[in-house]
Amino acid sequence: MIHSNPSWWQVFKSVAASAFGVQTEANRQQDFRSRSFWPYLITGVVFVTAFVLVLVFVVKLILAGS
């Protein structure tokens, strides 16, 4: 069975939802039917890196103000 690849926006939404633990079962199944895991891997690495950098920035901002 051939499945179409999801758009980058769909991949981002899926990665963000799963990172916060709110991924629906239907979306999870759709993700696993995708032909390639590379878009999810790349988006996941970028998402986690951006998330960590934002946390570091917020902590530095808070510590600089005190």
Image: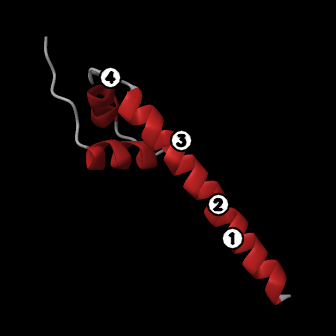
Residue 53 badge = 2
Q: Which kind of residue does numbered mark 4 sit on?
A: Ser
| Classed neighbour count for the residue bearing mark 1: other residues with Cα under 10 Å, few (<14), some (14–19), many (≥20) | few
* Placement of 23 over or under 64, stated as above or below: above
Q: Which residue is mark 3?
A: 45
**What mark, if any, has residue 8 been given in the picture?**
none
CA gap, disc 4 and disc 3? 16 Å
The residue closer to the viewer here, 10 or 36, is: 36
Q: Quadrant of the C terminus?
A: bottom right
Residue 33 percent location from the top left of the image: 26, 21
**Res 54 → quadrant:** bottom right
Type of the residue with mark 3? Val
Which residue position holds label 1? 57
Task: Give left or right: position of 18 versus 50.
Answer: left
Residue under the point 69% across and 70% down: 57
Question: Which class describes the residues within 10 Å of circle 4: few (<14), some (14-19), or many (20+)?
Answer: few
Q: Kindly check if marks 1 and 4 are in contact, taking CB atoms under 8 A apart as contact.
A: no
Provide the secondary structure element on which disc 3 rests: helix
Estimate the spatial distance between the alpha carbons at disc 1 and disc 3, rounded to whole Å.
18 Å
How far apart marks 3 and 2 lie (CA) works out to: 12 Å
Q: Is residue 16 above or below residue 60?
A: above
Q: Which residue is mark 4?
A: 36
Q: What amino acid is labelled 1 in the image?
A: Phe
Res. 18 visible in picture:
no
